[in-house]
Amino acid sequence: MENVMRNFFLFLSKNKFLTRSAKKYGLRFGAARFVAGETIEQAAAVIRDLNEKGLKATIDYLGEFVDNKKEADQMADNCINAIEAIGREKLDSQISLKLTSMGMDISDDIVMANMKRIMEAAKENHVFVTIDMEDYERCEKTLQIFKQLRLEYDNIGTVIQAYLFRTLQDMKDLDEYAPSLRLVKGAYKESSEVAFPDKADVDENYKKIIQMHLLHGHYTAVATHDDAIIEFTKQFVKDNNISNDQFEFQMLYGIRPERQLELAKQGYTMRVYVPYGTDWYGYFMRRLAERPANVSFVLKGLLKK
Ligand code: FAD
């Protein structure tokens, strides 16, 4: 049943009609639990509050699978707007973005021009930029673009998904770039030809890449809500004398907020991924796909109205 629900919400997450309608009608159906608002001012207020509680942030202007230059350029403008707000308001925040929203599906020139604009603004404002990882089809291209930008900028990182078979090789290939990586299980619906179908295998591979990246001395963001993985990481760094400066935990806004605070109080760097913007629909559907409890939360909210 859980698998059927997961596939259903992942299917809905790609529906273009619903994506467009959601933009028109504003944050609905309990999405505000996972999305910090539609404007940068609303998102900045959420980040300020997180910072006051000892949590760091990475802000994401929501948007994906953009297919025209005008929209891609606007998405980049919005990212720059967020970077400038971080600088101006001295927020303790990085930014995260998706290359498909910067024009990756349109042309190499468009995505690179937008990324260069963003990276220059980020450099000026001392803001770190993480390129989120999208579906398998875009993985190779995303890594290529990351590598190209990494040669020019220090303040850039990307994401590696434990569920992909290619991941161990990707980590080896990335090693020479000394990359700062966010390690995740993976959020998209992928075929069993390219990704581990069993959760236990994904978890094993996840542990493997966490160990590998930490032992190679690179900065590691362990982005998960899974206590088993969090405890594994804590023990591993302790056993290997790895300092707290070399890694951090990350979780999504609205998911396990008490655990986020607890980890920060224990002295770990805890970063919250804060999405905002009008294009919240695909992101929201993926959160529902992840956990049936999230769906019942939304249904309860609807029934109360
Ligand atoms: P799961 O296997 O989903 O959950 C494991 C356990 O965690 C559960 O059994 C439960 O014990 C606990 N748990 C999970 N959710 C809850 C909850 N709501 N309340 C209580 N307990 C809970 N994916 C990508 O593909 N690309 C990206 O760029 C990307 N960026 C991410 C950035 C961040 C900061 C985070 C946190 C995730 C990101 N993801 C990304 C999503 C990621 O790939 C997973 O889909 C998502 O994090 C769910 O997997 P999980 O590791 O939390 O563990």
Image (spheres, rainbow, N blue to C red):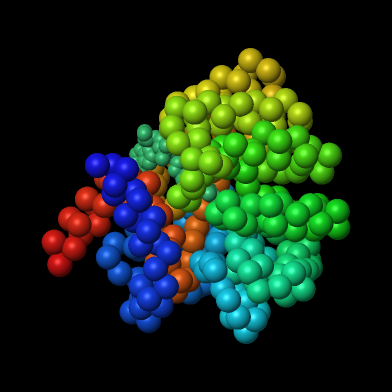
Whether residue 80 is visible to the viewer of this picture, yes or no, is no
Q: Outermost residue, right direction?
A: 152
In x, y percent, where is residue 303?
13, 61
Q: Outermost residue, top direction?
A: 239
Depicted 181 relative to depicted 118: above or below: above
Whether residue 240 is visible to the viewer of this picture, yes or no, is yes
Q: Name the quadrant of the N terminus.
A: top left
At 41% from the left and 77% from the top, the residue drawn is 20
In x, y percent, where is residue 93?
61, 56
Q: Name the quadrant of the C terminus.
A: bottom left
Q: Find residue 103 and report its image quarter.
A: bottom right
In x, y percent, where is residue 179?
75, 43
- Side of 280 relative to 288 (left or right): right
- Side of 143 relative to 16 (left or right): right
Give the tally of numbered discs.
0
Depicted 190 relative to depicted 95: above or below: above
Give the camera-side residue of 162 and 52: 162
Give the camera-side residue of 48 and 73: 73
At 63% from the left and 69% from the top, the residue drawn is 105
In x, y percent, where is residue 223?
54, 41
Q: Outermost residue, bottom direction?
A: 70
At 52% from the left and 53% from the top, the residue drawn is 273
At 38% from the left and 76% from the top, the residue drawn is 17
Depicted 285 relative to depicted 16: above or below: above
